[in-house]
Each structure stands twice: as C-alpha cells, then as structure tokens.
Amino acid sequence: MDDSMGMDYHPPEALTIIAGIFLVFGGLCGLIVLGDIIWRRGWKSMMLIMIPTYPITATYMGPVGLYLYFKYGRAADPKSLNASGMGHQHHAGMAMKDEEAGSNTENDMEHHHGHDHAAMEHSTMDHSTMDHSAVDHSAPEMTTHDIHMHHMPGDKDRPLWATILIGVSHCGAGCVLGDIVGEWLVYGTEATIRDHDIWPCLLVSYAFALLFGIVFQYLSIAPMSGQWGPKTVWRAAKADVLSLTFFEIGAFGWMIVYQVGIWNYRLEMTTWTYWWQMQVAMFLGFWTAAPINWWLITRGVKEPCA
C-alpha cells in the first residue's frame, strides 16, 4: 500500500483528542522551563547549550524533564549572582573554579614541603597528588575520580543517575531537532523508498540528528576545555555518535511499529496523532540511550553536562 492511500485516512476523533492533550501538555512543560530560564536570565549562569536542551527535553519527557531542570539544572537566582558579583556565564565560572583549585593545590604542596624532611620527599609527592584529586573532586566537571557524586553549581550534589539522564537529554535534543527537520524535509520533497516515505524519513532524520547532536556536544565540550577546532569536533563525535544511535534505536523502533505495524503506512505526518506517536518515540529513545550514556560517562568518553 503506498502512502497516497493514507490521504483518505483520518484517525478516530478520540485518538486525536488524546494526542492533542499529550502534545499540548508537552508544549506547556517546555514553555515552563523556557520561561523560567528567561525569567532567571539563565544565560548568565547556565552552560549556553543547555538553555535549549532543557525545554526541548521537557516537551517529550514531561514531568521527568521538569524534574531534571528544576532539581539539577535550574538557572541561578539573578539576585544571588548580582550580590556575589558572579554575573558571568557558567563555563567562565567553571574556569575560575579550576584556577582556584590549582592554586589551592600548589599551596598544599608548599605546606607539606615545608614540614616534611627530605627523606620523606617521595611520600610528600604522593600525598600532594592525593590532595590534587580531592580538589578535582569538588570541581564542577566530573572526572573518573568523582564519577559517583557530581558537585554542581548552587551547592547541589548531583548523583550519577541524574548526570546520566541529563547527558541523555543533551543528545536527545539533537535527535529531536534532527527528526523534525528530516521529517518535514522528506514530506516537502515527497521522497519515497519502495513507495513509502518512512524509510527516507529514518535515513534523513538520522543524518540530521548526527549533525545536530555533534554540534550540541561540541558546544558543550569546547567552552569547558577552551579548545575550538577539529580535535574537539572529533571528541564530540566520539561522545555523541553512540549515544545518539542508541537513542534512535528506541525512537525509530517505535516509529516503525506505529507506522508500519499499527497504521499500515496510513498515518499522515500532518495529523496530531502522528506527532503524538513521535513524542512517544522520543520518550522511548531517551531510555534506550541511558545505558550507553552510563558507559560513556563513567569511562570518561563523554563530558557530563551542566
């Protein structure tokens, strides 16, 4: 059955109403997060790439997206930033903390050197190295030494599971944008494979998801590392390709189930029901990407997002 036969198909009215409720609810969740970021001037304290990430996540994850933002990612109160003279971007603040950490480490090394005998020089160096790890443990960026508890801005201890889910949301935002662009591009060009548009949709959406995902990851790594160039692009690709692919396994799997198995290619892209099913697909993709993000983050391949 070719896609043109779906032109005459209209989902049941009850299904359209349910789809509308879920889509409107997701949109409201996204607007709540976006409004809070604007209200609190999030660009002054948040990692810039997380400003679109959190609202996008809330549109398809609903309460989960709201919880992650308000519990672990919410922009700092502008009044507290002004009071402390910290009206700068989040990544700049992290760099300053890193410098302070390095300074504290040097002071610790001098202190030990002044009190220990020359015969104890080797153990003193070992002890200073341990102090250096301790300082890094309190730094905003998570390393393999402090992977099980991440200390975030605002004195919030972020557990590993939250770091993983926020990492998924980061690649998920790229997938969502890629799927939206890919879907409408295929729809506008009327491209088909074997008389059906779902197959070019999957291919084109995956390509755009990779593009957006790597860009998102690059804009996360580069400000923290201070390196802008091909090496950082390669780091971003290594960090995001696996994560994004596992996200799309869940998302594309459900797209095939509902479009091929349930609706037999009849569900049109211009219906509310279609985009509700896309919302479900993104929700499922979020969870299929969680295990690989745990592996990537705990192995130090992927940088945690703020």
Image (cartoon, helix red, strand yellow):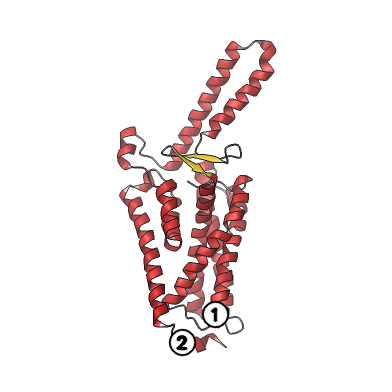
Disc number at residue 235?
A: none
- Left or right of 121? Residue 139 is left
| Viewer can see residue 51 | no
Label 1 to label 2, Cα distance in Å?
13 Å
Height in image: 174 above or below 265? above
Amino acid type indicated by mark 1:
Ile
Amino acid type indicated by mark 2:
Tyr
Please count the marks in the image.
2
Disc number at residue 9?
A: 2
| Viewer can see residue 82 | yes
Classify the position of the N terminus by image quarter.
bottom right
Residue in the picture at 41% in, 46% down = 46
Q: Residue 218's x, y, as percent?
A: 53, 51
Image-quadrant location for residue 93: top left
Height in image: 141 above or below 116? below
Residue in the picture at 40% in, 64% down = 26
- Left or right of 99? Residue 292 is right
Label 2: few (<14), some (14–19) or many (≥20) C-alpha neighbours in 10 Å: few
Height in image: 217 above or below 180? above
Disc number at residue 262?
A: 1
Residue in the picture at 69% in, 12% down = 119
Please, which residue is most extreme toward the front here? 14
Q: Residue 117's x, y, as percent?
A: 65, 10
Residue in the picture at 47% in, 73% down = 184
Height in image: 177 above or below 97? below
Image-quadrant location for residue 201: bottom right
At mark 1, the secondary structure is: helix
- Left or right of 38? Residue 169 is right
